[in-house]
Image (tube, rainbow, N blue to C red):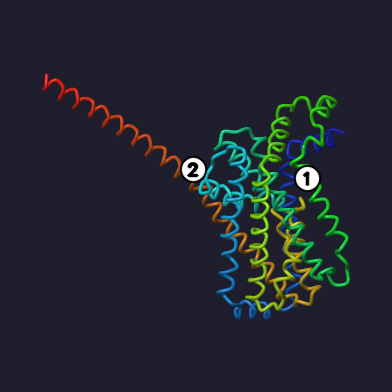
Amino acid sequence: MDKKNKIISFYRKNKKTIFLVLRIAISISLIAFLIKTQFKDFGIALDTLKLSHKGLLLLSLSTHIAGILITAERWRILLRAQNIGLGTGNLLGTVLIGFFFNNFLPTSIGGDVFRTYDCAKRAKIPIEKSASVILVERFSGIISAATYAIVALFLGFTAIGEQSVIIPIVIFFVISIIIGFLLINPSVFKLDRLVERISSLRRIKEKLSNIYHTLKSFKKSKAVLVQALLYSFLLQFMVILNYYLAARALDIKLGLMVFIFIVPLVTVIAMLPISIGGIGLRENSLVFILVAMGVMNEKAALLSLIIFAMLMIVGIIGGITYIVRPLLERRNERINIVNKDISEVNGEANRHNQELKKSEKG
């Protein structure tokens, strides 16, 4: 009995660490599974990589840079609608660091947690308000992905192999629209009544109230929401281009329209809270779909690993930003203090000179 209690106690104390380790193990296992099962002939994979179009691979990588800029600008306009004046340059560093955390936190939305806290700290706003803005931003992205998937259905991409995907995509689209509507119409939830009825919610009444009022305020900013949605469509297209250009570099002869169908599906699958940053889930789901569409196993697997490597490159840049930015900020603070002291000294000197001139005239 004591042993059982010790195990339960250990689990409760280390629950987060245990789940983190499990997710890391799942990610590593999924990547190992992909390599073992898909690379039947490593010679083909190496030849494909040697013959790949390096210019297209660089162009594919550049879509990540464009995507980061778009993400920062989309976030800025949503914050501005809440009278939060953080600039695109400031947000750009936070977005980059968010990419770094995406690779080390559970699910592909782990970076949003960092962005929420960092924005709240820099703008000196409640964490709930910051989280609400991120929530609206995230769901504008989900709606754009669902819309691209619906467009793909109309273009005739209705199945993966022999398996129809019409019903799942339609359900996903409808759910996305409903959630999007509820986000900007939170009064439908009647949170005030719900809080009063459920005693456990009363303790976080103020936080729920902040979330409620922030979401509700977006209803008055329809033009901003439309603008954010347009940025989301553009961002999703950059992700589609990223996959498409990398595929073309490996001589995978699938059209852009095919990737309009594939990428939203892979993006949504990567959001499942199973692995770290969607690693393993994203790669295996991409390979599964591509092979079902007639792509060679080795090429499909190589493409998935190249996309993974690109995400890692951006993540590493984000990690460097995470280390360097505080150092630069402290340096700038010291410079500002010195400049302020110099200004005060110069001001005092000017006043002293003026007093001397007056006394000489007197």
Residue 252, horizontal then vertical, whole percent: 69, 77
Residue under pointer 1: 181
Quick one: which residue is furthest to the top in this view?
362
Mark 2, other Cα within 10 Å: few <14 / some 14–19 / many ≥20: few
Asked if the residues shown at circle 1 and circle 2 are in contact, with their CB atoms under 8 angstroms apart, the answer is no
Seen from the viewer's position, the closer of residues 216 and 193 is: 216
- Element under disc 1: helix
Q: Position of residue 27 (x, y in %)?
A: 72, 57
Left or right: where 260 falls relative to 169: left
70 to 341, vertically: above or below:
below
Q: Which mark is residue 326?
A: 2
Q: Residue at x 52, y 50 (%)?
A: 321
Q: Residue at x 79, y 62 (%)?
A: 150
User: Which residue occupies 59% across, 63% down?
Assistant: 63
* Residue 15, x across and y down, in percent: 75, 40
Please provide percent x and percent y for residue 95. Answer: 58, 50
Using the image, determine if residue 104 lies above or below residue 239: above
Image point (67%, 67%), residue name? 243
Label 2: element kind: helix
The kind of residue on which mark 2 rests is Pro
Task: Name the front one of labels 1 and 2.
Answer: 1
* Amino acid identity at mark 1: Phe
Q: Is residue 339 left or right of residue 349?
A: right
Q: Quadrant of residue 41?
A: bottom right
Location of the N terminus by quadrant is: top right
Q: Is residue 49 left or right of residue 183?
A: left
- Quarter of image, res 79: top right
Quadrant location of the C terminus in the rendered image: top left
